[in-house]
């Protein structure tokens, strides 16, 4: 029997599990749901392709939350990439996928043929995936639909970028993430979260930057209570107590 959509609860699933009735609530929302990573639709059947926890974001977005480091590009994802090559009018950017992404020099705020962006090989970019499918190279942009950067572009060279699991990034992006709330309340810093499992951090000093990076990396496998204890020690340590 199908579970009503309003009674949804996270559940553990395995590859190949049929989730059609559980996700669509008996079919009344079958044409409105959005399937995220780990879910696949074959005609009328929805099944899981990964082992993990089935999650839901209201109203009708579903995905499988699992410990995964391999990134599969998806349209609309904001990612952190490293410029590896400059070829004519495009840059090639490593985003951790199976192939490098391309980025036009015109895909920056205010860029024209005469006013080209100052992007060098080795720079770290925060960009959005405009095109992402298995038959084409991923394509990035550093502007939104109105032509504004909205925080996208080359991030500061004095920050620090590290690799983590995709599940940790999704946890940090959630509204009720305790570590992000505590960091925002106690430490001034800048952060860019890439859906490809990369996080860039910059604080007022190298010492503080390393402390924030360690706190973020350690919070993946500890409870909310342990996060609070860790943050108290971190804040006291930075204050010299």
Image (cartoon, rainbow, N blue to C red):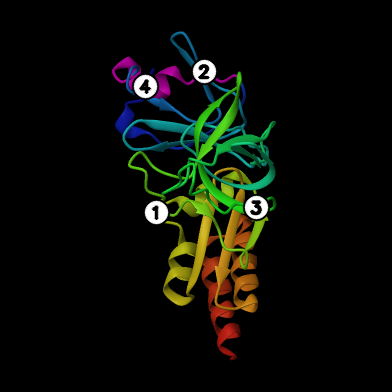
* Relative horizontal placement of residue 142, taking residue 51 as reference (left or right): left
Total label count? 4
Marks 4 and 1, the one that precedes in the sequence: 4
Q: Quick one: label 1, few (<14), some, or many (20+) residues within 10 Å?
A: few
Highlighted range, magenta: 16-29
Marks 1 and 3, the one that precedes in the sequence: 3
Secondary structure beneath label 2: loop
Q: Quadrant of residue 223?
A: bottom right
Q: Quadrant of residue 73?
A: top right
**Camera-side residue of 82 and 176:** 82
> Residue 236, image x and y in percent?
56, 85
Q: Quadrant of residue 208?
A: bottom right
- Residue in view at x 61 percent, y 32 percent: 72
Above-or-below relation of 200 to 31: below
> What residue occupies the far front of the structure in this picture?
114
**Camera-side residue of 166 and 195:** 195
Label 1, on which residue?
175
Magenta-colored stretch includes residue 238: no
Label 2, on which residue?
18
Label 4, on which residue?
24
Q: CA distance from mark 1 to mark 3?
A: 35 Å
Nearer the observer: mark 4 or 1; the answer is: 1
Q: CA distance from mark 2 to mark 4?
A: 12 Å
> Residue 123, image x and y in percent?
64, 54
- Residue in view at x 42 percent, y 73 percent: 185
Nearer the observer: mark 4 or 3; the answer is: 3
Q: Quick one: label 2, few (<14), some, or many (20+) residues within 10 Å?
A: some
């Amino acid at each position: 029997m199908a579970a009503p959509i309003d009674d949804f609860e996270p559940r553990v699933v395995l590859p190949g599990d049929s989730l059609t009735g559980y996700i669509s609530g008996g079919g009344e929302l079958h044409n409105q749901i959005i399937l995220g990573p780990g879910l696949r639709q074959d005609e009328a059947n929805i099944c899981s392709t990964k082992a993990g926890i089935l999650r839901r974001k209201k109203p009708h977005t579903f995905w499988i939350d699992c410990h995964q480091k391999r990134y599969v590009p998806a349209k609309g994802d904001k990612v952190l990439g490293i410029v590896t090559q400059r070829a004519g009018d495009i840059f090639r950017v490593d985003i951790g996928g199976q192939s490098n992404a391309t980025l036009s020099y015109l895909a920056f705020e205010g860029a024209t043929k005469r006013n080209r962006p100052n992007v060098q090989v080795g720079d770290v970019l925060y960009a959005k995936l405009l095109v992402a499918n298995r038959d084409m190279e991923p394509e990035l942009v550093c502007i939104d639909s109105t032509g504004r950067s909205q925080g996208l572009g080359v991030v500061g060279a004095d920050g620090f970028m590290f690799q983590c699991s995709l599940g940790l990034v999704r946890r940090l992006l959630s509204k009720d993430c305790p570590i992000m709330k505590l960091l925002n309340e106690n430490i001034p810093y800048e952060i860019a979260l890439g859906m490809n499992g990369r996080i860039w951090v910059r604080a007022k000093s190298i010492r503080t930057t390393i402390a924030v990076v360690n706190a973020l990396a350690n919070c993946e496998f500890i409870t909310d209570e342990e996060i609070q204890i860790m943050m108290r020690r971190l804040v006291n340590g930075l204050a010299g107590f």
